[in-house]
Image: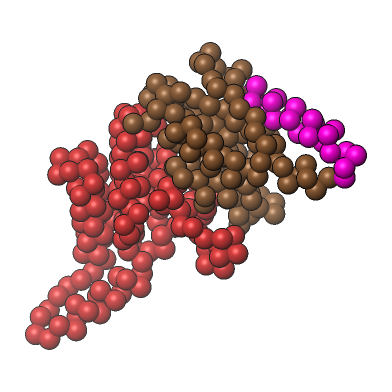
Chain colours: A red, B brown
């Protein structure tokens, strides 16, 4: 393992995922990259919120959105790994599966870490499942945590 | 600390990417390695009485062969285990009983009928395993 990519989400389970990923990556001497993907809806909602503040001219474009996503990934990383934890934080906006695989490709990640929700096969067929999509869409190893 | 890695194999691939990735990881952490294969008890139970022993013996032999393949892939000492049970549950139980830190398993490629699901056993292992599951996709011939 040389470049590990961790899918950070806005959930409690994300902290355990980051901790596990860090243990495996650091043990293997790999770089650790924490990615948070803001969905298009979240981004537009945020844009809408900010533009509705009267009297304030806020320019909340994609660049700002990406910066915020990165900030979130960094905040999680610092909480789990400490302020001097070794990792890179990165933010993206869009469909999570697409952005995660794109980030893995552009950064040449060789191992992805993602949390797996406890959905039944039927639930997955109806709602989709990110962990499974990553396992199917990524050529390399994917480590999935459940707790 | 990663002290124990368990490789769950059904022998459907010979020395595979999953086994290599898992052994590499175990090497890094100087972790103990277990290779396990599960004889699916539901398959045995659902067979006709008169064939049951034969089927069980055949499945056991398949499982042993799967485990032997992993043993042959390295000079390191590996604890082999052939167990009978419901595959995903048996793997989860084994992980608990042996204090396994990571379970490694291969998954089928994305072609064919498993286009949207990763295969029922792998899917259940990933969903129910109490410890992280390292999943390595078998690349199909065209990839």
Residue located at (38% from left, 64% from top): A94
Residue located at (17% from left, 73% from top): A59
Out of B84 and B65, give the one closest to the viewer: B84
Q: Position of residue B21 (x, y in %)?
A: 49, 30
Residue located at (35% from left, 47% from top): A17
Q: Residue furthest toward the right?
A: B50
Left or right of A46 on screen, residue A84: left
Out of B10 and B46, give the one closest to the viewer: B46
Overall secondary structure of the magenta section? helix
Would residue A101 be visible to someone looking at this image?
no
Q: Residue furthest toward the bottom?
A: A54
Residue located at (42% from left, 47% from top): A145
Q: Position of residue B129 (x, y in %)?
A: 50, 45
In the rendered image, residue A126 lying in the magenta stretch gets the answer: no
Q: Dividing the image into 4 quarters, which one contains the C terminus of chain B?
A: top right
In the rendered image, residue B60 lying in the magenta stretch gets the answer: yes
Out of B134 and B59, give the one closest to the viewer: B59
Would residue A26 be visible to someone looking at this image?
yes
> Which quadrant holds residue B102?
top left
Q: Position of residue B3 (x, y in %)?
A: 40, 27
Q: Dividing the image into 4 quarters, which one contains the N terminus of chain B?
A: top left
Q: Is residue B53 above or below residue A113?
A: above
Q: Position of residue B39 (x, y in %)?
A: 70, 36
- Magenta segment: B48-69
């Amino acid at each position: 393992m040389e470049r590990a990519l961790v899918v950070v989400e806005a959930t409690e389970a994300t902290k355990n995922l980051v901790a596990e990923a860090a243990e495996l990556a650091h043990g293997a001497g790999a770089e650790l990259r924490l990615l948070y993907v803001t969905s298009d809806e979240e981004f537009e909602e945020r844009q809408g919120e900010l533009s509705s503040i009267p009297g304030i001219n806020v320019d909340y474009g994609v660049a700002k959105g990406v910066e915020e996503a990165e900030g979130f990934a960094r905040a999680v990383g610092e909480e789990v790994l400490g302020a001097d934890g070794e990792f890179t934080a990165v933010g993206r906006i869009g469909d999570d599966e697409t952005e995660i695989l794109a980030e893995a490709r552009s950064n040449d990640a060789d191992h992805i870490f993602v949390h797996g929700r406890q959905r039944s096969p039927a639930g997955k067929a109806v709602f989709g499942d990110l962990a499974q999509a990553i396992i199917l869409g990524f050529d390399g190893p994917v480590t999935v945590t459940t707790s | 600390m990663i002290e124990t890695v368990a490789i769950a194999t059904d022998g459907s691939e010979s020395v595979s990417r999953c086994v290599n990735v898992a052994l590499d990881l175990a090497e890094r952490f100087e972790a103990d390695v277990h290779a396990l294969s599960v004889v699916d008890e539901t398959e045995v139970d659902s067979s006709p009485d008169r064939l049951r022993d034969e089927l069980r013996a055949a499945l056991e032999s398949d499982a042993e062969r799967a485990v032997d393949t992993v043993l042959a892939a390295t000079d390191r000492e590996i604890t082999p285990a052939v167990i009978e049970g419901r595959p995903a549950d048996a793997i989860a139980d084994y992980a608990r009983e042996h204090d396994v830190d990571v379970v490694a398993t291969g998954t089928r490629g994305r072609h064919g009928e498993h286009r949207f699901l990763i295969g029922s056993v792998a899917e259940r292992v990933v969903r129910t395993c109490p410890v992280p599951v390292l999943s390595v996709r078998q690349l199909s011939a065209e990839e």
